[in-house]
Amino acid sequence: MERKKNKKFFIIMFILIVFFAVSYMILKNKMDGDEQVASQRKELPNKKVAPQSERIACDTYSSEKEVMESAISTGNEKICSCVRDKSFKDACQGVVLDLNLYSQALRGHDENLCNEMVSESRKSACFAAVKNSIPDLYKSDVTQWSSCENGKQLAMNWTNKTRDGGENEDIDLTRDCNGKCGTANAKEYNATDSSFGEFQPCAVGTSNPSNPFPEPGNNNTWICEGLDGGRNSENCVASRKFYTCSGDFPNATPCSGDSGDLIVPTKSILVDSCNVNQKCKYVCDSSRGYRRQNNICVK
């Protein structure tokens, strides 16, 4: 009986020893694993934290108008985020984007940047400015132009210093050489005008005839002769109105049919009858009892 008890005791002790041994091994492996992970973490380089986006102090602006003015004057599109109305915010961002692109296109003489602009009207202005920017950006003294080829001429022997005094840039200076009507084309001028004024007969080339401004009541045509072998333009045309009668008379009516086709300035006159062979005649309104006395109508 005693031997059975001892055998049972040893069996229980063996099971307990095995249990503690297995538990110990499991715990040790876990601790070793934790230490390895911790060691690996120490060896990993610290990740850089992405910088926070620029914060705009919207409360410093007293109105949305002030926000937009600040965004445009500084060229900072992010300031537009302070505009509450979405349509105005989009407009603000569009204007700032366009102005920045405009400035970059002009500085770099790169019209491709104009294509990225939002507004079609500002895009057109950008193309025109870039096209005309070389004379402004580069102080050139052209002494000779190449012959006209495909509507373009290349400047020969010219100075291409940058406007800000930086290094010279390797850039070709060209100009159009096919004749082209100017801003005076297809316009109607008043009889009192004596010249095209601010408008030019030719955008490119030389006007033929040299002074094509029309007479009162007439149309006039001219061509713009191409430069150095360039093609002539199509006919350009401008018109000029007739003069009109100047002045009128109270209680009088104008005679019909004699106030048109005036090619010289003509003052109105008061007469007894429309049968007088003169222009710009007035007669007193007899239907209301008026008659002429000297140069006025009286009852």
Image: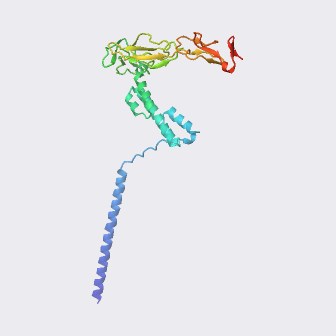
Res 228 → quadrant: top left
Q: Quick one: which residue is furthest to the bottom in this view?
A: 1
In the displayed structure, does residue 166 sit left or right of residue 295? left
Q: How many marks?
A: 0
The residue at the point 39 percent across, 14 percent down is 223
The residue at the point 42 percent across, 22 percent down is 133
Q: Quick one: which residue is furthest to the right in this view?
A: 299
Quadrant (top left/top right/bottom left/bottom right) for the C terminus: top right
In the displayed structure, does residue 40 sit left or right of residue 249? left
33 and 168: which is toward the camera: 168
Q: Is residue 9 above or below residue 30?
A: below
Please name the colour scheme applied to the rendered image.
Answer: rainbow
Q: Is residue 212 above or below residue 12?
A: above
Residue 93 position within the rendered picture, expressed as x and y whole percent measured from the top left? 47, 37
Residue 233 position within the rendered picture, expressed as x and y whole percent measured from the top left? 36, 17
Residue 291 position within the rendered picture, expressed as x and y whole percent measured from the top left? 69, 15
Residue 230 position within the rendered picture, expressed as x and y whole percent measured from the top left? 33, 15
242 and 20: which is toward the camera: 242
In the displayed structure, does residue 150 sit left or right of residue 181? left
196 and 131: which is toward the camera: 196
Q: Is residue 232 above or below residue 81?
A: above
Q: Is residue 40 above or below residue 256?
A: below
89 and 161: which is toward the camera: 89
Quadrant (top left/top right/bottom left/bottom right) for the N terminus: bottom left
The residue at the point 51 percent across, 35 percent down is 71
